[in-house]
Image (cartoon, rainbow, N blue to C red):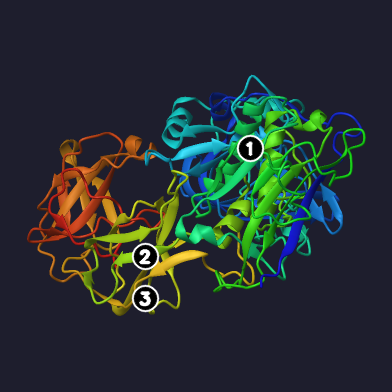
Amino acid sequence: MHRWRIIGGILATGLWAAGTVPAALSVYMPPEELSARATLVVEARVAESRPGLDADSGELHTYITLQIEHVHRGPARLTEVVVREPGGRWGDVVHEVDAVPVYRPGERILAYLEPASDGALRTVGMFFGKFRLEESRTRGPLLATRDLEGQGTILGLAERPESFTRNDLVALTAGVPYRQAPRAGRRAKRERASSEPGHDWSPRPPEWERLTWDDGRSDPRLGTAGGPATARFVALNSSNPSRWNEADSDTAVVVNLQPDGNPLHDNQAAIDEITRAFDAWTNVPQSRLQLTMGDTDFDYTGQYASPSSSFSGVNVVLFDDPYDDISDSTGCGGVLAIGGYWRGASVGAPINNVSFHPSLQLYVIFNNDFECYLSDPDNLAEIAAHELGHAIGFGHSAEFDAIMRSNAYGGRGPRLGADDIDAAHCHYPHTFTLLTPNGGETWTSGDTETILWSSSVEVGGDPGTVDLEYSTDGGSSWTPFATETANDGSHSWTVPDIQGHDVRVRVARHALGTLSSPYPASSCSNDASDASLSVTAPIAGGIGASLTIEKLAGGRIGVSWDASCSTNAETYAVYEGSLAALRSGVWDHAPLTCDGGTDLTEPLTSIGTASYFLVSARLGTEEGSLGVDSSARERPEAAAACGTREVSSTCN
């Protein structure tokens, strides 16, 4: 005999009860203006974001530490900067500021920065100057996206968020000259005299050493102080969580719609917005869950009692509170809708350390007399996505940007936040199978091998990305070698210098935030080699770290270098490339000579006026490493390479 339990969630709003919501009024700032204004332009990974209090001044700011990956304008050797932005939390006091860019720990970004009057770095144009870097769905160039959602009215711009290719923005930065912004006061004359970037700023704000930090209750938009954002998603019923097991067999959860009484007064328009809400959850690449529309003219009220009080086994979305389940609104304030599910009493095998009850029926019921809010299609889709989140098992999130937070946004549409995506990922994960290497193989450092894996089908159309990692201790610890690479089942890997017999490889999807108990600390979906493989040493090695250049008579140059770490090196190849191309992110080095001898020096005629040089050892037809760049990434083989490469990372 089955036992049934009902779980429900509500979303309330009082935002409109006292008139309109205050919002920022902004004038659109194009990338050209960002390029002209930015003293410093960097690609970076956000290492930390936390609020700090300057006890001397009593000022509270949020401080974002950026680990630099590329400098497109500014000092080339810059490795880390701290950006200061308004807002934050100190104890029970919260300062929230509209139009401030939100930097989330762990994300890759392209940032346009400028100095404040005291030299502290800040983002040019506030939210306009921060772009999130992400893989293109077409496997093309990286996309740079700035999220203009929720930042008030932006005159002259309709698209939110807005994306460019990373290469276009980098080229634009190189092509638009820096223009010092004039300032009033005693500093103006000196500052306006400078037409080059790089003046009057500091990698850390001047108050950095005297700051005191919050006790861990950081700005809810930015995650826990001192570390990455913490996953805040929770089950709607934490003691008895529920999920739709249909996802494990790629079976869609079909939901019917009774369009009568919809607040858009247009049945097809209402169908379209509810479909958008379904798609928001279905299209999460990390999740296997599918929500799909069933009968769009379903007569539920003519057949069944209220789904909030009686089990029918039929999934449904209802408008106009047909069973009077929700208190009526007052002055456009109150409960917008409720969503919930019926579940079985048994539990299945744990998924990501959580034992779930099987969900059996879901429902969403919208309140009546809420045209003041729900007559906006985006608002209708937003609330539908939130209530469907309850119906598929999630409670309210503490994260600022989550669709599952307890307050309505307005104008957002059904966009999910990172915390919502993590929830869908950990409750409805895809399955991965690592095919190669799966144990027993012998690979050589420097060789290029192909990693192969399979995964369950992503019905949403976007297969998403995965991280690839290796372990040298049989899987006790993991080191990434490809992050956010396309989930296409194949990746070419140049095996690093990790000789040993206990090497394994893993394909994984990591959460966007840091997972907390009971969820696994590393990943909610992954698969590793079933057994270890061996990695052996290469034949030819790279050269040492030292390379010098001198001017010779007749316009020639002399290139000298350290000996290879391999005693078997027979000769050396010397390459030359253009610094201009390198600054634009392109390696264009070509061989000046493929036989530089063993005397560790070579007179050459340069092919350019602003060049860089690379030297590699050679043994017969095999060529050693060209070394790694400042980000520890292997320099690529030239289009016209001198020989088949045998890369060794033991030498630079």
Out of 231 and 155, give the one closest to the viewer.
Answer: 231
Quarter occupied by residue 413: top right
Callout 2 environment at 10 Å: few (<14), some (14 to 19), or many (20+)? Answer: some
Residue, disc 3? 472
In the rendered image, the residue lying farthest to the left is 620
Q: Earlier in the sequence, mark 1 or mark 2?
A: 1
Q: Position of residue 170 (x, y in %)?
A: 45, 34
**Do callouts 1 and 3 mark residues in contact (Cβ within 8 Å)?**
no
Identified at 70% across, 60% down, the residue is 224
Front in this rendered view, residue 53 or 48: 48
Q: Which mark is residue 274?
A: 1
Which corner quadrant holds the N terminus? bottom right
Q: Secondary structure at mark 2?
A: strand
Q: CA distance from mark 1 to mark 3?
A: 49 Å
SS assignment at label 1: helix
Real-space Cα separation, disc 2 to disc 3, in angstroms? 20 Å
* Residue lying at 50% horizontally and 55% vertically, measured from the top left: 288
How crowded pointer 3 is (Cα within 10 Å; few <14, some 14-19, many 20+) is rated as: many
Viewer-nearest of discs 1 and 3: 1
Residue 433's mark? 2
User: At numbered mark 3, what does the secondary structure look like: helix, strand or loop?
Assistant: loop
Q: Is residue 565 visible?
A: yes
Image position of 325 (left or right of 418): right
Q: Amino acid at mark 2?
A: Thr
Label annotation for residue 38: none
Instruction: Answer above or below: position of 547 versus 28.
Output: below
